[in-house]
Each structure stands twice: as structure tokens, then as C-alpha cells.
Amino acid sequence: MKAPALADRTHRIAPFQTMELMKRAVALQQAGHPVIHMSIGEPDFKAPEPVMAALERAVRAGHTEYTSAQGIEPLRRAIADDYGRRHGLDIDPARIVVTAGASAALSLACCALVNAGDRVLLTDPSYPCNRHFVSAFDGEPVGVPVGPDTRFQMTPDLLAAHWDERVRGTLLASPANPTGTSIPFADLSAIVDFVRAREGFSLVDEIYLGLSYDGHARSALELGDDVVVTNSFSKYFHMTGWRLGWLVVPPDLIRAFEKLSQNLFICASTLAQHAALACFTPESLAIYEDRRAEFRRRRDFIVPALESLGLAVPAVPDGAFYVYADCSRFSKDSSEFANQLLEQAYLSVVPGHDFGATDPHRYIRLSYATPMAQLEAAVSRLRSHLGR
């Protein structure tokens, strides 16, 4: 029997190549090959012991019921307090919506803000799922080509040059995937002002803000309570599979976001919410800061190591745990180069084609969210593969 026809939007959403490549790498590993994984954006650290203990207590206490669609009040208050502690911001916990990861947060935001046919400006390259969140609600993601000259980030001039009467808003990430670069705060402020003057929306993904390495990290929430911000427990807090994130929304939109969350998700995992309260204890925060320092140490190792091999890094990452490296000296096609590394050196990296249409053949993304010994082994394999 013939399957039902798919909705047109499904054809606008490409496979997530990073995950497809990950499947191949895992298959090689299961076949006995010593694969080093530098593809998927997942910390090698796990949730620290205080968080694991809090999860066990939540299970024993029977915290398995539905919660409010916005999340449990103690967690929303803890997140708000963290903004005060880190950024000096006074955020009303009522503005926080706890979600099933940043993916659910971005989906919820696009559902709330994007009409059919609306254009949303993003950088190209950028995290591939972001454009698909827009497409899923029948919006039109518009990639703005960016490169080394802007550290692969949006600028006020680029935004203005690509804005037209159909543009509804912008979805930006700082620090960003795949490059690990951040938007200078003065530029971000000018972007928000430009969008605000046109009555659009500014949606800023800050999932990697806690993993900033150079200078004091500043949240877009400083720029006004009309900015919509997403974040997550996945990266800085090392809880990827727990599927827990959050939104901070404008006061006037709280009820609308709550209504949509009720209908689309009901609530985030109750157990994960109760466990996440332990993320904000002094003991846990000290662990997270030690791990952030370790990520910085890895960055400071891998960037010069890649450059010494001829894999140029045109924009040194200041956050996240990615390096966007230029492989054009060795290959005309990053996909072919990534395949060779996987099949011949058992090193899993991601070709630039996953992240957009701007020079994707030139770049590969490497994740340094892996132990230092593995990074050292990866550099050794690269050296051998490249004959350096």
C-alpha cells in the first residue's frame, strides 16, 4: 500500500549530516576501528555528582508528574538568579519558559513569532537546525553569507543590506556553531536596535554563552526585555541527553508562549527539572568553571596544532568547543576530505556542507569536546594523513 503524501515542508528540511556522519563513525567503531570522534557537539564530561544525586532523589521522591508548561518555579527562579550572579541582570522568573532542550525552545519561538512566508535572517554558515526550525513553521530562512572578515558573524551593515519588507526578524547565535565565534556586543546592540526600529524580533541563541573564554560574556538580555533568548543545560552544564533548556521571553508574550508550550510539549522532563536545581549549587558551579577552563586549554592546544599542519583557522574561536578550519590546501571538497579522514585515519569531523552554502567546500568543523589525550592522538593522525 502506498504511504500518505508528505507535507511540502518536509522536502525543505535536509538530513542533519552531522548525525548521519556520526552513525558511520559509530559503525566503524563497532567494527573494531579506533575512531576518534570530533564531529558531534557533545561534551565528553557528564553531569557532576551533585546533579546525579539530585536526579536519584527526584526519582525516589516520585517527581514524575506533569509540571506547569513553563517549568517548576524553583528552577525558573534558579535560572533567573544565575542571570543576576553572572550578568548582573534582574530577570523576572515569570519570563522564563523551561523547555525540552534548546531545540524545543527555538521551535517554540519560531511557532510564536514566524508567520507563513516570513523571512528570517540567519548567518551562513550557521547551525543547520536553526534554518529548519524556521522552515518547520513555513517561514523562509535567509542565509546571509559571512566569512573570516566578520569572524563568520552577522554585522549591522550585513543585516541592513539583506533586510526587506518580507523580513520578520533574525535568529542569531553567540557564540556560534560551527565557528565558536561571538558577535561583538556593540554590533549585537546595533542589530537589536535596527530590528526593533522595524518592529521585528531578535531571537538570540546563547546555548554556548557559558563556554566563553576571552573576556566577560554578556547576554543579549542586557539590550531590552523585547529580546528573546534561548539557552540550554546541554553544553555548559553537560546534560545533552537530559533534554532540558529554556527561553526568556518578553513580559507581554509570556501567556502566548505558555499556551503554545502547553499544547506542543505539555512540559519538559520533570525529573530533569528537579535534578537541574543542583546545577546552581556552589559545588556544581565550581566544577563547571573548572571544566570551562579545560575546554579553553583544549582550544589553546588544537588551534595552533591545526595551523601548524596547514589547516588554517581564519577565526580563532572565543567560545563553544568548535574550530572551523580551512582544508582547501589539501582538498577541493570538504566532504571528500572528511570521508578520507574517517575511512583512512579513523578521525570523524564534519564537512562545511552541513552548515550552509557559503564556501562549504573549504571548511571542516572539528569539535574539541574530547579529552586532551584524544586531541593529541587526532593531531598525530592528521599529521600522518597529511604527510606533515
Image (cartoon, rainbow, N blue to C red):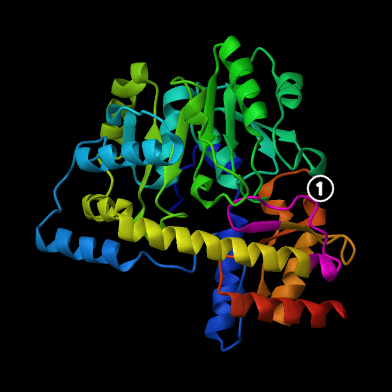
The answer to whether residue 291 is above or below residue 165 is below
> Magenta region: which residues?
306-323
Q: Which residue is mark 1?
A: 359
Residue 150: quadrant of the picture? top right
Residue in the image at 62% along x and 68% along y: 38
Percent position (x, y) of residue 373?
60, 80
The percent coordinates of residue 143 (x first, y second) are: 69, 34
Amino acid on which the number 1 mark rests in the picture: Asp
Q: In the image as oriented, which residue stretches furthest toward the right?
A: 329
Residue 84 percent across, percent down from the top left: 38, 35
- Could you tell whether 327 is left or right of 201 in the image? right
Taking the image as drawn, is residue 116 in sight?
A: yes
Residue in view at x 56 percent, y 40 percent? 130
Q: What residue is at 39 percent from the left and 21 percent from the top? A: 250
Of 98 and 3, the residue lying toward us:
98
> Is residue 320 one of those drawn in magenta?
yes
In the displayed structure, 353 sits above or below 75; it is below
Q: Is residue 6 left or right of residue 245?
A: right
